Image (cartoon, grey):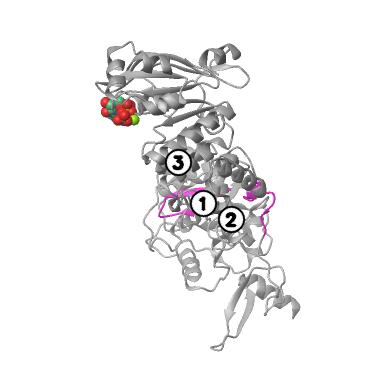
């Protein structure tokens, strides 16, 4: 641990303030709790909300995993992992099963999570009604009265226009049969993992200064219609590296001649499967 | 059917307004307003600009709390409450199921970012409809009823003419089959011929559906055509209230006389 920083960078008072927001968020699943977001040594859009949440909950015996779009080895994931290794002196890992805290952008790991683990999501836009209603005072009322018809209007419009619900990322959910929530830009493929998950899920939006949560074993339902039920992406191919057929696949361009292949977006999951197969 | 026989047929008013006052600072917009509205009855509110018509309408429909007085409404089960005593969620449900609000400017009453079908379907979804095909079927019925070509169901409202937008707004409100509709100059921005068509349509709908309505208008011809009773407002007060034909043919208050004589005889 480097001298000159407080443990995990943030001062204790700030961490306490953020923890209070987290506790409130856990008590009211899906509800966006405002908090006094601090300046962090990286710009908004790089996960400042998630980093502040992680900094507030991390302890010296935690094991941290950081992923960006499913991968542990992207610049952003590496720099956040180093940041906490340096400021909190914690152990880091790429293995989902070994981590106690997983900070993520845009994915939920494929390896099933277990009780005691915490997933911290980086959230760019927390308010699911913002596209419709720019006024905070109005969206607060809509949440207060669970006045969410407009979200179904949006899905209706998708079906009328494209024949199916076209939303594939940040697909809106109802948490605990009450609050409408943006799950952050994870693919809808990951939405079912939010439902009744044994792990605690925390969501931090730095620029918009909001924290919300899905506590363990909470009902999370993706919005849909009876005759156009929610469904996840499927591929008619398997991962070119590990052969997985039930994982979220990324399309990778392999050459300049239109060559491409599909590989797991969760690099740890993919590597582990290859190891086991070998 | 005239207003009297309607009253005889239904023993409870839909709406009872008692000693309603509303001011903005020193300016009184509504002063001591009292009246009952009966099921199936159409009441027109006329008066010069600034008389307080829109303010009254907003107080009646739940948009603006009066300073004093009561707006009592009767639910379908016969129970009566003050509109401003019930919890906000209940008021919201009432406003989107049993009541309708049609604004003068379609911009205030429609969503311009989504299709005509979505505009009509919204109220159904708000009360829990979750079957896409059924929502669409019901929306199509109401579009047809308002003489909007169902083939244009997936178009955005800005591609519609002013008259169509207004009819779309009405379809959007009627889809939940409300008992009471509030309209603030629903034909205000339209050409005369389009106005006439819309009025015709409104008149037949009100008759067929047994709708009660409060219609604010500048136009005595609108009142003559649609309203059972007529309320004349001046300076925030009701100066005359009676059967439409009686008030128009034999106005009692000097201001009503002025109003009636100042427009071409209808
Ligand atoms: N939000 C407000 N703030 C201040 N004054 C208001 C407000 N709304 C209405 N008023 C005032 O209340 C009075 C009644 O206004 P209202 O809009 O009800 O009249 P109106 O009869 O609907 O007129 P018009 O025929 O021009 O639409 C006017 O003097 C108006 O200036
Ligand atoms: Mg007005």
Query: In the image, is residue B139 part of the stretch drawn in magenta?
Result: no
Write down the quadrant of residue A164 in the picture: bottom right
Label 3 near label 1: C-beta < 8 Å? no
Badge 1: residue crowd in 10 Å (few <14, some 14–19, many ≥20): many
Label 1 near label 2: C-beta < 8 Å? yes
- Indicate if the residue with disc 1 has its beta carbon within 8 Å of ligand 2: no
Return the residue at label 3: B166
Spatial distance from mark 1 to mark 3, Cα to Cα?
A: 14 Å
Badge 2: residue crowd in 10 Å (few <14, some 14–19, many ≥20): some
The residue lying furthest to the right in this view is A277
Mark drawn on residue B115: 1
Spatial distance from mark 3 to mark 2, Cα to Cα?
A: 22 Å
Near-viewer residue (B78 or A125): B78
Near-viewer residue (A138 or B213): B213
| Image location (x, y in percent) of residue A78 | 50, 71
| Image location (x, y in percent) of residue A114 | 68, 56
Return the residue at label 2: A160
Task: Note whether residue B89 is visible.
Answer: no
**Of helix, strand and loop, which mostly describes the magenta segment?**
loop
Q: Residue at x 63, y 39 (%)?
A: B128
Mark 2 chain: A
Mark 1 chain: B
Mark 3 chain: B
């Amino acid at each position: 641990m480097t001298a000159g920083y407080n443990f995990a960078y943030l001062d204790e008072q700030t961490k306490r303030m953020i923890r209070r927001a987290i506790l409130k968020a856990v008590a009211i699943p899906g509800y966006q709790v405002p908090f006094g977001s601090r300046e962090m040594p990286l710009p908004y859009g790089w996960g400042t909300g998630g980093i502040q949440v992680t900094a507030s909950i991390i302890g010296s015996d935690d094991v941290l995993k950081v992923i960006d779009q499913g991968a542990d080895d992207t610049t952003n994931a590496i720099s956040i992992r180093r940041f906490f290794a340096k400021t909190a002196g914690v152990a880091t890992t790429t293995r989902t099963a070994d981590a106690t805290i997983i900070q993520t952008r845009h994915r939920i790991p494929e390896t099933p999570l277990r009780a005691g683990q915490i997933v911290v999501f980086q959230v760019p836009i927390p308010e699911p009604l913002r596209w419709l209603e720019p006024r905070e005072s109005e969206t607060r009322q809509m949440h207060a009265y669970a006045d969410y018809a407009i979200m179904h209007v949006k899905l209706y419009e998708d079906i009328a226009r494209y024949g199916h619900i076209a939303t594939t990322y940040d697909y809106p959910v109802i948490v605990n049969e009450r609050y409408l929530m943006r799950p952050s830009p994870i693919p809808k493929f990951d939405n079912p993992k939010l439902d009744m998950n044994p792990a605690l899920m925390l969501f931090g939006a730095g620029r918009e200064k909001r924290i919300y949560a899905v506590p363990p074993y909470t009902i999370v339902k993706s919005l849909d219609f009876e005759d156009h039920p929610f469904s996840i992406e499927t591929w008619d191919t398997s991962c070119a590296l590990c052969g997985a057929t039930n994982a979220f696949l990324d399309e990778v361009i392999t050459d300049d001649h239109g060559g491409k292949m599909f590989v797991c977006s969760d690099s740890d999951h993919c590597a582990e499967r290859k190891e086991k197969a070998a | 059917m005239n207003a009297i026989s309607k009253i005889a047929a239904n023993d409870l008013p839909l709406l009872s307004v008692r000693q309603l006052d509303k001011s903005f600072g020193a300016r009184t917009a509504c002063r001591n307003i009292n009246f009952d509205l009966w099921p199936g009855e159409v009441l027109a509110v006329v008066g010069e600009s600034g008389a307080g018509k829109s303010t009254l309408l907003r107080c009646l429909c739940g948009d603006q709390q009066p300073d004093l007085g009561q707006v009592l409404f009767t639910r379908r089960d016969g129970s009566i409450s003050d509109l401003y005593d019930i919890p906000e969620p209940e008021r919201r449900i009432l406003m989107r199921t049993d009541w309708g609000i049609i604004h003068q400017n379609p911009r205030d009453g429609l969503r311009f970012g989504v299709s005509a079908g979505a505009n009509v379907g919204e109220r159904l979804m708000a009360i829990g409809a979750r079957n896409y095909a059924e929502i669409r079927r019901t929306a199509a019925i109401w579009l047809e009823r308002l003489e909007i070509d169902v083939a244009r169901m997936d178009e955005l409202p800005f591609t519609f003419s002013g008259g169509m937008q207004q009819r779309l707004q009405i379809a959007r409100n009627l889809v939940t089959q409300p008992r009471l509709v509030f309209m603030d100059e629903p034909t205000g921005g339209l050409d005369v011929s389009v106005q006439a068509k819309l009025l015709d349509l409104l008149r037949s709908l009100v008759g067929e559906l047994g709708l009660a309505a409060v219609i604010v208008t500048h136009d005595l011809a609108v009142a003559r055509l649609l309203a059972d009773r007529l309320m004349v407002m001046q300076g925030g007060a009701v100066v005359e209230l009676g059967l439409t034909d009686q008030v128009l043919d034999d106005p009692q208050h000097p201001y009503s006389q002025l109003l009636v004589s100042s427009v071409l005889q209808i």
